[in-house]
Amino acid sequence: MENILNINVIKILSLFGIIGAVFYFAHVIFGRMFYEGYNPFSQAISDLTAVTSPSRKIASAFSFLYGLFTVIFSISFYIYFRGDINKIVTLGSLFFCVMTFISFFGYMFFPLSQAGFAGTFKDKMHLVVTAVVVVFTIVSLILFSIGFLKTSNFKYLGIISICTFAALLIGVILINKLPKEYFGIAERVNVYSIIIFTGILSLWMFWIVKNGQKCLVLYP
């Protein structure tokens, strides 16, 4: 009975990643609804939660839930799979976990002071948080790509990790190459790829737990 209860708890926690992704898109959708004149083509997503933003309350509420659920999921993912697939995936999940922590607390404590970049201390720290999040995200995706490709039955997750990494790089390139009028589009390519990847990891973990396949991890 205790094992069944534990498995059911793990199943619930495994879905926190996809729930967090839903909250993220809710913060974008509802934030835009409460931000008259917001232009998703040119404006950053962070403008929705800026201190002076008219959508701050609603967008920040959904953003908080996104961060909370994603952090809990990342911890659960790391603990559940730690050492069971291979050391590379374990390290990747650790970097992913740290990334969600930095993202959650960093953006919560250092929102933009206003739409755009006003150059205040919080604005500068917001950029620092973004840079650190990007680095940890890139490292975790590289490790996931290598780690999952080394397995016999989860190579598809390695391919998904590579595709996500490619989308992230494309987003970075677009941010630097496209005119400022299209910054919002470029940023969304970057950010949404990670959110979707998190949702995929969440559903995959749920599937593994539900089907009891944790012990069936194979190596080449």
Image (tube, rainbow, N blue to C red):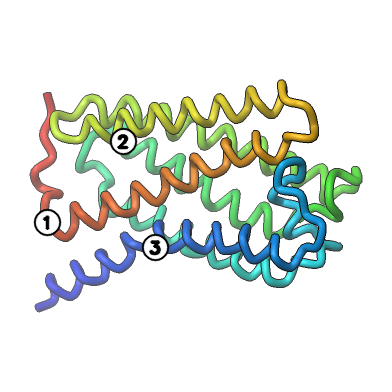
- Cα distance between the residues tagged 3 and 1: 18 Å
Residue drawn at point x = 52 percent, y = 63 percent: 23
SS for dot 3: helix
Q: Disc 3 marks which residue? A: 16
Q: Is residue 169 left or right of residue 200?
A: right
Q: Give the residue at x 86% y 62%.
A: 52
Whether label 3 touches label 2, CB < 8 Å: no
Q: Residues within 10 Å of mark 2 (few under 14, many from 20)?
A: many
Q: Mark 2 — residue?
A: 89
Please tell me whether mark 2 sits on a helix, a strand or a loop. Answer: helix
How far apart are the alpha carbons under marks 3 and 2?
20 Å
- Earlier-in-chain disc, 3 versus 2: 3
**Residue at the disc numbered 1:** 211
Q: Earlier in the sequence, mark 1 or mark 2?
A: 2
Q: Secondary structure at mark 1?
A: loop
Looking at the picture, which amino acid does disc 2 mark? Val
Locate residue 54: give its quadrant: bottom right
Q: Is residue 68 left or right of residue 179?
A: left
Residue in the picture at 59% in, 49% down: 102
Asked whether the viewer can see residue 67, the reply is no
Residue type for callout 3: Phe
User: Quarter holding the C terminus?
Assistant: top left
